[in-house]
Image (spheres, rainbow, N blue to C red):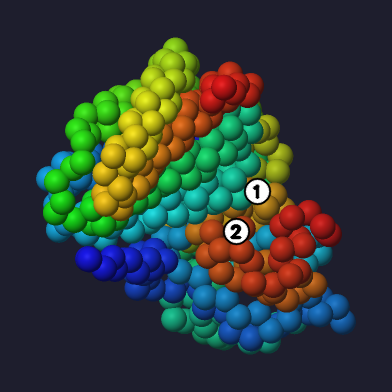
Amino acid sequence: MTTIVKPEVKTAEKETVKKNKSSVYKTEQLNLWYGSNHALKNIDLDIKENEVTAIIGPSGCGKSTYIKTLNRMIETIPSVKTSGVINYRDKNIFDKEYQVEELRTKVGMVFQKPNPFPKSIYDNIAYGPRIHGIKNKKILDQIVEKSLRGAAIWDEVKDRLGENAYGLSGGQQQRICIARCLAIEPDVILMDEPTSALDPISTLKVEELVQDLKKDYSIIIVTHNMQQAARISDKTAFFLNGEVVEFDETDKIFSNPSDERTEDYISGRFG
Amino acid sequence: MSVRERYDTELATLNNKIVELGQFAQSALRDSLTALDNRDIEKSLLIMDEDIKANRIEEEINDLAILLIAKQQPVATDLRRIIVAIKIAADLERIADFAVNIAKSTIRIGNDSFVSSIDNVHKMYDITEEMIELVLEAYNDEDVVKAKRIAELDDGVDELYGETIKNLLSTSAAQPEKIGQITQLSFVCRYLERAADHVTNISENIFYLVKGKRYDLNK
């Protein structure tokens, strides 16, 4: 009689192709104080290029503080003290000789509320390039079109570029702000709750846009909408009381987080 | 155009994987019958080896479904589609397992000639095959008319099953020395009958997907 050999069933090995992406931002032992309030504690984060990194956490956890540190915007608050290192493309942005202006041309930012300039749509986008000395109308036209296309709003505004940007809807204004950010061809885009003032459909449009943009940019997004982080990011960092509790692949964080506090937060049990 | 293109793409991937698993189960079952016909032990062993693929596709479907639920907050038809995909994947994986079981029976039967004609086994298989074909189309097209037709076909399989088992039992009385083979052939019939039941379960899930209500087609 023939003996039956049962084939061994192995668990399917996940084929995770890990590309060696370079880091855009490497934060090491970052501490930050507002006066005596210790707002960020020993933050270590390695943020890779061409990825969407989401930062989530309850109010007051330090997520906005962290993102504002990345372009040194936080320095506008006089009582702020920092220690530790933030390397942007391998250079410590806290070094004395570091040119903050140079950093900010490489790192664009989009805020919670759309903040277009009280100018025409065209001038909003051309503003940055003009400051950088571009005067040629043809080149400016090209930049404006490319940026508006990049922000997925070209078709909606191409026939009224001369109109004031204030006449647009909130969702459109936010995409204008993103286009304005793209016009200076940044390396990184920081987004601080970019959709919290938008309706659900505009929110989804901006979310789709973020996913498209990561082909060319590295995006760091602060959001208090954890479902948004789940939908759009590659990596998620969970901040709590100024500390990073967990930083991992978004798939992992939202299907099987390592830390109980992360699980409690994402499943709505606190915060 | 949909605003959530990526979400739609992921849902479509889930659908494609179901169809992939279905086609795998379908061809495994077909191969297991051919191997039985020819008492082809090599082929039967191969069918057993290859079953790992069905398990893998089912795992992929489950993983994808879990991530979709965790990350995309599906509601309404989308949510049903994901839940149904998990259930259908389990049924299809089970059908692939029956192909393995038939392969094992073929190996146990060995080179012996059949005690009686296995025409009825073929008839059962032909209907089951048609049911699988139809259910994959019904799933893909979300077509409840096709899904309903499957329940009718399943009645045919059940009838043939009863009849065939009865014949095999009377053969075993006449040729008790062949009891080993007769038992294996009865098992094969049982596997086909079960496979057809799983196809009917899938039809019920297609009804649930499309209508949002539960129907019992296995009555």
Determine whether label 2 and label 1 are within 8 Å by CB: no
Q: In this view of the protein, can residue B131 be seen by the observer?
A: no
Label 2 marks a residue whose chain is A
Question: Which quadrant holds the C terminus of chain B?
Answer: top right
Seen at 39% across and 55% down, the residue is B55
Packing grade of label 2 (10 A; few <14, some 14-19, many >=20) is some
- Tell me the residue that label 2 is attached to: A255
Q: Position of residue A270 (x, y in %)?
A: 83, 59
| Most foreground residue, A264 or A151 | A264
Seen at 64% across and 72% down, the residue is A258
Q: Position of residue B140 (x, y in %)?
A: 38, 26
Seen at 55% across and 85% down, the residue is A95
Question: Which quadrant holds the N terminus of chain B?
Answer: top left
- Rendered image quadrant of residue A48: bottom left
> Residue type at mark 1?
Gln
- Judged left or right of residue A246, residue A60 is right
Task: Give residue A227's mark.
Answer: 1
Q: Where is residue A18 in the image (x, y as percent from the top left)?
A: 36, 69
| Most foreground residue, B48 or B88 | B48
- Judged left or right of residue A20, residue B143 is right
Q: In this view, does A17 lie above or below B162?
A: below
Q: Where is residue A111 in the image (x, y as percent from the top left)?
A: 65, 50
Seen at 26% across and 57% down, the residue is B108
- Rendered image quadrant of residue B186: top left
SS for callout 1: helix
Instruction: Indicate which label's residue lies in the foreground, 2 or 1.
Output: 2
Q: In this view of the protein, can residue A20 be seen by the observer?
A: yes
Residue lying at the far right in this picture: please name it.
A36
Label 1 marks a residue whose chain is A
| Most foreground residue, A19 or B33 | B33
- Judged left or right of residue A28, residue B157 is left
> Residue type at mark 2?
Ser
